[in-house]
Image (cartoon, rainbow, N blue to C red):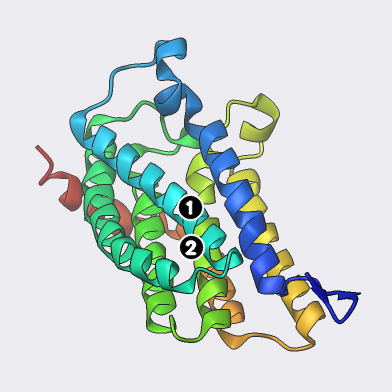
């Protein structure tokens, strides 16, 4: 953008959102190509109808995220706001369907087994926390929808929140060998880098961005600490006992 003969760069929050709109679909495709998007070429096991519904919902979310970033970049704010109503309904469906998919996978198994030899019941904490984080971050973003800078930063964190599920499924042996250092560490680094860049450009920390990032990073650590505990295993066993 040129203003008074001077090249004016887009705000940092917009550039971070654009970067997320590029990275998210690439990582999702790389992670789920074998078991979902390109499964016909890899002859992976068939998927249950509920898993297909989950896949459609999550794909729709990625496409919606890209569309919303493009609409804001194009200054089509009203269209962005109208599409936001669809996003709320889609988010509710993602949480509900995702919960049942996660519970069924913990009981009956999934196309991709948990990484690192973690038991299915122990690993159930990971998708359940993903959904909880998504609900909290997206709910906060909707609450702050009239404060554009805060809203965009929280929506960026919702995208980062979904990266571990895809990263853990990328079939590169050297990456898989890293375990949580890879699929939790990489998103943690991205979130920390985004907050740092945002602070450097604006010379102040956005409290919602910082709080959301710390919330996300804490959830990564807590999952690793709690997934093998007797308390969680008992609770996960109770949850899966209801799955049919």
Q: Is residue 9 left or right of residue 67?
A: right
Q: Which residue is mark 2?
A: 158
Percent coordinates x, y for residue 61 in the rendering: 40, 51
Q: Is residue 178 left or right of residue 166?
A: right
Q: Is residue 128 left or right of residue 65?
A: left
Residue farthest along the front direction in this orientation: 4
Q: Please name the residue shown 41% across and 78% down the image.
A: 140
Q: Quadrant of the N terminus?
A: bottom right
Percent coordinates x, y for residue 164 in the rendering: 53, 48
**Residue closer to the observer: 37 or 5:** 5
Image height check: is 154 above or below 36?
below
Q: Please name the residue shown 57% across and 73% down the image.
A: 153
Quarter of image, res 211: bottom right
Gap in Å between the C-alphas at discs 1 and 2? 7 Å
Q: How many marks?
A: 2
Percent coordinates x, y for residue 139 in the rendering: 36, 74
């Amino acid at each position: 953008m040129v203003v008074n003969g001077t090249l004016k760069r887009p705000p940092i929050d917009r550039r971070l959102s654009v970067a997320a709109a590029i990275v998210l679909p690439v990582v999702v495709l790389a992670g789920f190509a074998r078991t979902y998007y390109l499964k016909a070429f890899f002859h992976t096991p068939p998927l249950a109808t509920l898993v297909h519904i989950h896949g459609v919902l999550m794909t729709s979310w990625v496409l919606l995220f890209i569309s919303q970033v493009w609409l804001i970049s194009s200054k089509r704010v009203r269209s962005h706001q109208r599409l936001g109503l669809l996003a709320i309904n889609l988010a509710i469906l993602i949480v509900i369907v995702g919960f049942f998919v996660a519970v069924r996978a913990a009981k009956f198994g999934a196309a991709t087994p948990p990484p690192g030899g973690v038991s299915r019941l122990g690993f159930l904490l990971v998708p359940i926390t993903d959904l909880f984080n998504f609900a909290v971050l997206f709910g906060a973003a909707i609450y702050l929808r009239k404060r554009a800078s805060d809203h965009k930063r929280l929506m960026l964190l919702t995208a980062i929140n979904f990266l571990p599920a895809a990263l853990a499924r990328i079939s590169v042996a050297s990456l898989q060998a890293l375990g949580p250092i890879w699929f939790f560490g990489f998103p943690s680094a991205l979130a920390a880098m985004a907050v740092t860049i945002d602070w450097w450009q604006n010379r102040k920390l956005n409290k919602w961005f910082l709080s959301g990032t710390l919330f996300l990073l804490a959830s990564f650590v807590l999952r690793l600490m709690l997934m093998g505990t007797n308390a969680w295993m008992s609770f996960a066993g109770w949850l899966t006992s209801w799955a049919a």
